[in-house]
Amino acid sequence: MLAGRERALATVDLGAVRHNVVRLASLLPPGGKLCAVVKANGYGHGAVAVAEAAQAAGAAWLGVATVDEAAELRAAGLAGPLMIFGALTGSELQNAVTADADVSVWSERFLIEAQKVGARLHVKFNSGMGRLGADAATAERLAVAAAASGRLAGLMSHFATADEAETSYFNLQLDRFLDLATKLKQRFPEMIAHTANSAATLREPRAHCDMVRTGIAIYGLAPANDDPFKDDLRPAMRLSSYIADVRVVRPGESVGYGRRFIAECETRVAIVPIGYADGIARSLTDRGTVLIGGHRCAIKGTISMDQLTVELPGAVGKPGDEVVFIGLGNDQRILAEEVAQLLGTINYEVVCDVGPRVARRYVGAESAA
Ligand SMILES: *Cc1c(COP(=O)(O)O)cnc(C)c1O
């Protein structure tokens, strides 16, 4: 009926992804590599399309969290170095090798399993994140054993506080990592040392080492959930729906579950066919705003699974108009960072929550980076 509109649409600007990758790579020392992190379906943006754009812009590596994510990239024809960050079961480890993906190792037990199937290994050192990872002595033993069988690919660690203003713990972790990396690189110069996420990449050249693993910033989102533009990052995702109908609600009448919105005066309300199953958090009820024709309008009443309602000021909005949840509209914009602040979470979660029911449309695939 409403030609040209998608019920729920994430428009992903691959030109922005390429710009962000080039921008991040420009910070690196000569020969420094960038691993584009495309786990969780490319932070909701679509892993395959983002991986292709990142490689076109010079990303040498791709990083994912799970073996199925690695297999998806290979099935789509993506070649080149690929690594899986997370823990793997025995059958997942076998599938990782089949997908020609490197894996991380932090225990003797896993090393034995990984060597049986011939996996290429990145020793994961716990420099202070306090999740997975070996202590320095164990990491060294694992590296020596992996190198003996010709399967040592890297030494890695991960920061707990790279996005925080206070830098002492970050620096402690970095010093621990650099100590171990320097020591091991003397013995195994081919091994790549990598520890920087997006925040560390933007903040601290000493953390760049041989490779950085950038996720959030390649999507144009700010690692500290503040302002992506201050780092010359371009947000890649626009999330939108459309006005399916406009109703006039009379005083005393209510809209939606729980009668959370009861009109005090005659009010125009837009019904928008997108809901929490698409990733518009239910807790944005009565708090979120959207852009319609460049105007900020308030979400009113309970957000349902498949629908929500927006109060329309004045004459704004008619059936078929676009409703923007994340993105630009005239001189107004809603950033994922703003939505995250409203929700008491971070931009990472806002984009990861954009569900499989939301169509992805890619633009900017052809233009130069
Ligand atoms: C997710 C992840 C990254 C990317 O972190 P960003 O903050 O999104 O840049 C890097 N390394 C590891 C091990 C990760 O799991």
Image (spheres, rainbow, N blue to C red):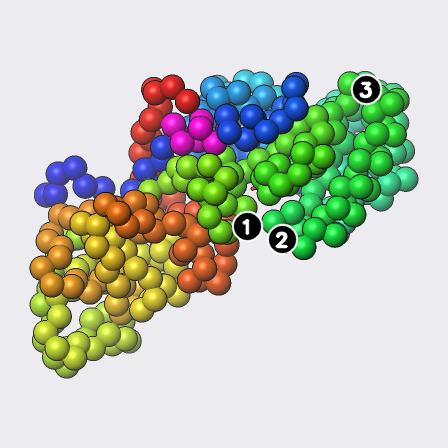
Give how far apart the Cα atoms at labels 2 and 1 are.
7 Å
Q: Quadrant of ligand 1?
A: top right
Relative to 113, residue 293 above or below: below
Q: Which residue has dot 3 on it?
A: 189
Horizontal and vertical percent position of residue 283 = 39, 65
Determine the image quadrant of residue 158: top right
Considering depth in this image, is 5 or 20 the residue closer to the camera? 20
Label number found at residue 224: 1
Residue 292 in the figure: left or right of residue 93: left
Seen from this angle, which residue lies furthest front? 230
The earlier-in-sequence mark between 3 and 1 is 3
Disc 3 versus disc 2: nearer the observer: 2
| In the image, residue 17 lies in the stretch drawn in magenta | yes
**What is the magenta range?**
14-21
Tag 2 near tag 1, CB within 8 Å: yes
Relative to 158, residue 147 above or below: above
Give how far apart the Cα atoms at labels 3 and 2 are.
32 Å
Residue at the spot 26% in from the left edge and 67% down from the top edge? 300
Q: Secondary structure at mark 1?
A: loop
| In the image, residue 139 lies in the stretch drawn in magenta | no
Q: Which residue has dot 2 on it?
A: 164
Determine the image quadrant of residue 136: top right
Tag 3 near tag 2, CB within 8 Å: no
Residue at the spot 81% in from the left edge and 32% down from the top edge? 181
The earlier-in-sequence mark between 2 and 1 is 2
Horizontal and vertical percent position of residue 277 = 36, 54
